[in-house]
Image (cartoon, rainbow, N blue to C red):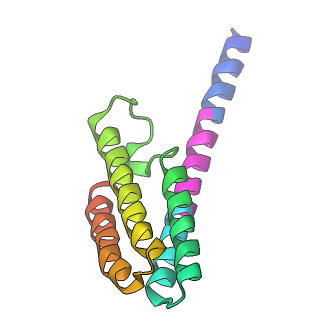
Amino acid sequence: MKKGFCLATLFASVLMFNQGVSAHQLETDMRVLAKSMTAFAQTQDLAEAKKQLMLMRKAAVASKASSPHKLEGVSKDDEQLKAYQHGLDLLLAQIDSVNALVEKGQLEQAKVQALELVKLRNEYHQQFK
């Protein structure tokens, strides 16, 4: 009986630790996205713009492995979790679209297109933050 209780307690502790780590990683990824978006908006250098978009993409991909506090513990089939993942997919597609413009040397058009990133952030933060 004691052994079962100890194992259950240990298992619960590991799960809680993992959720805390996951949430912390998501917060870190979101900070990277925010900082890179600001740096992208301020740069006039194509190489720097590409670098910031790469950092944004990397953080968005990493965010898919985590879930916000609001969705911790929900099933992988949960509709809200699917909506969260869909939002990240939209964000990644938009980052790729902006990057395509930067690759063509169209930095100003890319910055206009990047405003959609802000709209997506605002929309999905309302739902999941």
The residue at 39%/29% (across/down) is: 75
Q: Residue furthest top?
A: 1
Residue at 34% x, 66% y is 121
Q: Which residue is nearer to you in this view: 97 or 64? A: 97
Nearest to the observer: residue 14 or residue 96: 96
- Main secondary structure type of the part rendered in magenta: helix
Quick check: 114 above or below 68?
Answer: below
| 9, 60: nearer the viewer | 60
Residue 104 image position (x, y, % from top left): 43, 75
Quadrant holding the N terminus: top right
**Quarter containing the C terminus:** bottom left
User: Residue 124, can we see it?
Assistant: yes
Q: Is residue 2 above or below residue 95?
A: above
Q: Residue at x 34, y 47 (%)?
A: 84
Q: Position of residue 16 (x, y in %)?
A: 58, 39
Q: Is residue 1 left or right of residue 102?
A: right
Residue 49 in the magenta stretch? The answer is no
* Left/right of residue 25 with respect to residue 81 in the rendered view: right
**Residue 19 is a magenta residue:** yes
The residue lying furthest to the right in this view is 3
Res. 85 image quadrant = top left
Horizontal side of residue 50 vs 98, given as left or right: right
Quadrant location of residue 102? bottom left
Residue sitting nearer the eye, 75 or 92: 92
The range drawn in magenta is 15-28
Q: Residue at x 69, y 19 (%)?
A: 7
Q: Position of residue 94 (x, y in %)?
A: 35, 62
Q: Position of residue 48 (x, y in %)?
A: 58, 81
